Image (cartoon, rainbow, N blue to C red):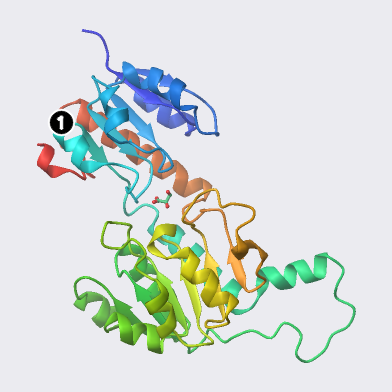
Amino acid sequence: MSKPRIFVPNRVNEEVIHYLQQYGDVDYRDQEEKMAEEEFLVGLRNASALLCYSRQKINASILEQAPLLKVVSNIAVGYDNLDLGEMTKRGVLATNTPGILTETTADLTFSILMAAARRVAEADYYVKSGQWKEWFPSLMLGKDVFGATIGIIGMGRIGEAVARRAKGFDMNILYYNRSRKTDAEAKLGATFVSLEELLQRSDYVVVLTPLTAETQKFIGVKELALMKKDAILVNASRGATVDETALIHALQEKRIAGAALDVYEKEPVDPENPLLKMANVVTLPHIGSATRETRAKMAMKAARNAIAALQGEIPENLLNKEVL
Ligand code: DGY
């Protein structure tokens, strides 16, 4: 019997490829840049499994051209790039990589919060660009993190991991989530509040909710207007959870003090985006889970999910259970 074809259109660790080769014919491209659509579709045509990153959209028109496809294994926890309805209709399993990247993403989220609070990127640029001519008392004054109030929107795994870090900074932890997390309340001293109360009371509003139809532009004009004037918005989920135009206006009109962003409505972000011109906005290129260790584990987990599916088992991280 011929082996199933496993399509890996982008770079992953070598061990992942060796693992996959035990189970199938691996069509691997050791390239970082996103494959051109036509080439991608040629690769997908004979594939039973696809391992891909979250920048790869999988929708009806792509699936139509992949008649043999049994599983799409996302090397990411977020899966807003996958049209689960269409995949289920066609009997294609979808999987993701939760858990593994929790602490790494929480580290990055907390570090951009701190960077915005203490103007780290701005101060670094100030020194490196030769602007530092003398020390004076109000030089790069920032905002306290220790003891301040943090409001976490989306108390999932990463939300809880951020809350653990906040506890170490003696922060007052508020959270808003679809359902109450009594565990997190007991362990971390977090307080469940309404979205309005969270926005009104927090010094740092941290968006960590996954992107779904309900969370599109979850933070918009009305929500930004409720925030304190000296508050900072942190987004490490998906760009589209925040209405970027509304955020730009709020920052331009100084209705909030700053922002720390790892994600944008459109990625890569347009170099002309006004957010990139604002000194009080920390801008990172979607690197929440980007450590060597974590990325290697994510790809291996994605590979294991794909192989389980190809072997007729239920993958550990199956997203569309209805497909069974
Ligand atoms: C994730 O895992 O969802 C990260 O944001 C990378 O896409």
Task: Please identify the residue farthest to the top as the structure is shown.
Answer: 1
For residue 140, above or below residue 283: below
For label 1, being within 8 Å of ligand 1 is answered: no
Which residue position holds label 1?
A: 91
Residue 76 is at least partly visible in this image = yes
Give x and y (percent) for residue 127.
81, 70
Residue shown at 28% from the left, 79% from the top:
187
- Front residue of 89 and 221: 221
Q: Is residue 33 left or right of residue 133?
A: left
Give x and y (percent) for residue 190.
31, 82
Task: Please identify the residue farthest to the right as the structure is shown.
Answer: 133
For residue 143, above or below residue 219: below
Q: Quadrant of residue 141?
A: bottom right
For residue 230, above or below residue 60: below
Q: Secondary structure at mark 1?
A: loop
Q: Is residue 210 left or right of residue 27?
A: left
**The N terminus: image quadrant:** top left
Q: Amino acid type of disc 1? A: Gly
Dot 1: within a 10 Å radius of its alpha carbon, few (fewer than 14), some, or many (20 or more) residues? some
Residue shown at 26% from the left, 76% from the top:
184
- Front residue of 88 and 192: 88
**The C terminus: image quadrant:** top left
Residue shown at 70% from the left, 71% from the top:
122
Task: Please identify the residue farthest to the bottom as the structure is shown.
Answer: 137
- Front residue of 323 and 18: 323
Residue 238 is at least partly visible in this image = no
Q: Quadrant of residue 95?
A: top left
Give x and y (percent) for residue 161.
38, 68
For residue 13, above or below residue 120: above
Give x and y (percent) for residue 195.
30, 80
